[in-house]
Image (cartoon, rainbow, N blue to C red):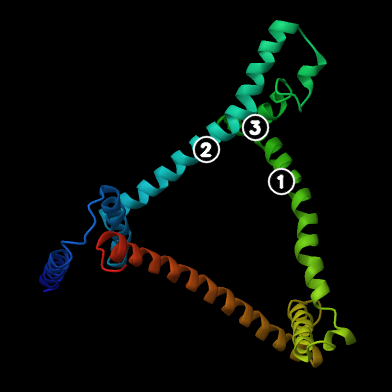
Amino acid sequence: MRGNVRYLAWAGVVVALGILFYSTRSTISHDPWTWVGVFLTVAVFSFLYRENRIYRFAEHLVVGVANGYSISFTVHRVIVPYVIKPLSAGFKALAADGPSLKLLDPNSSANFIILVPLAIGLLYFARFIPKYAWLVRIPMAIFMGYYTGQTVPAAFTGVVFPQLKATLVTQASFGGDPWLGVWKVLVLVGVLTTLTYFFFSREHKGVLKWSAKTGIIYVMVGFGASFGFTVMARISLAIGRFYFLFRDWLGILH
């Protein structure tokens, strides 16, 4: 019974597609790349029915293309201009002018100082040699230390300090637009009560209890808004795919 229903469903899909193609035979796209995009779009949407080989093919194709693009981008935009060209120019300058401190100048187009970060980066491959796998900690420590030092000041400047500034409520906050002052008060209450909710050094009793309950309301509102924004973004992507099918492929929409 279940198999018969499945065959009937597929037959219905084929009949519907046949009717759709016949009704749009004069407007349907003849661009082969459009048909490739249609095939991949339908292949991904087929996962809504169940996981199948067509979906896995599209998934593996995306992963393969992404990896290939990343490797090609790294080679042509990082390794060649920042490693191969400086070293090549450095060997040419060494052969022409002999040893010079200029070859250690990082601002020079011909330098050997690039060998230092190159050696550090190559230590990542020590992970594949069990005896020397511990060496991978060196580039990881440098990477994390550098970007932590770069990110923390930027986070304070771009996120923490502006949020602290937004919680300051003064008499001037109600001067121009009273509603703006009300919103500033709500922001201040939200910040204080949310911090109270995550304060676990004391048991939530009395005023602390009600402050924490108010804070969890702000937290849930924030999570809900974030989730709603994510859903809207995904829906907009789905609308874009359907718009591609009905405009670029079938030519129904103009």
Label 2: how many Cα within 10 Å (few below 14, some 14–19, many 20+):
few
For mark 1, what is the residue?
144
In which quadrant will I find the C terminus? bottom left
Tell me, yes or no, if residue 124 can be seen here.
yes
Q: Position of residue 210 (x, y in %)?
A: 75, 91
Q: Is residue 56 left or right of residue 141?
A: left
Q: Nearer the viewer, mark 2 or mark 3?
A: 2
In which quadrant will I find the N terminus? bottom left
Q: Position of residue 39 (x, y in %)?
A: 27, 55
Q: In which quarter of the image is residue 66?
A: top left
Identify the element where label 3 is drawn: helix
Tell me, yes or no, if residue 132 can be seen here.
no
Identify the element where label 2 is drawn: helix
Residue at the spot 58% in from the left edge and 78% down from the top edge: 225
Q: Label 1 is placed on what type of residue?
A: Met
Work out whether residue 234 or residue 136 is closer to the camera in this orientation and state it. 234
Q: Earlier in the sequence, mark 1 or mark 3?
A: 3
Q: In which quarter of the image is residue 64?
A: top left
For mark 3, what is the residue?
121
Label 3: how many Cα within 10 Å (few below 14, some 14–19, many 20+):
some
For mark 2, what is the residue?
73
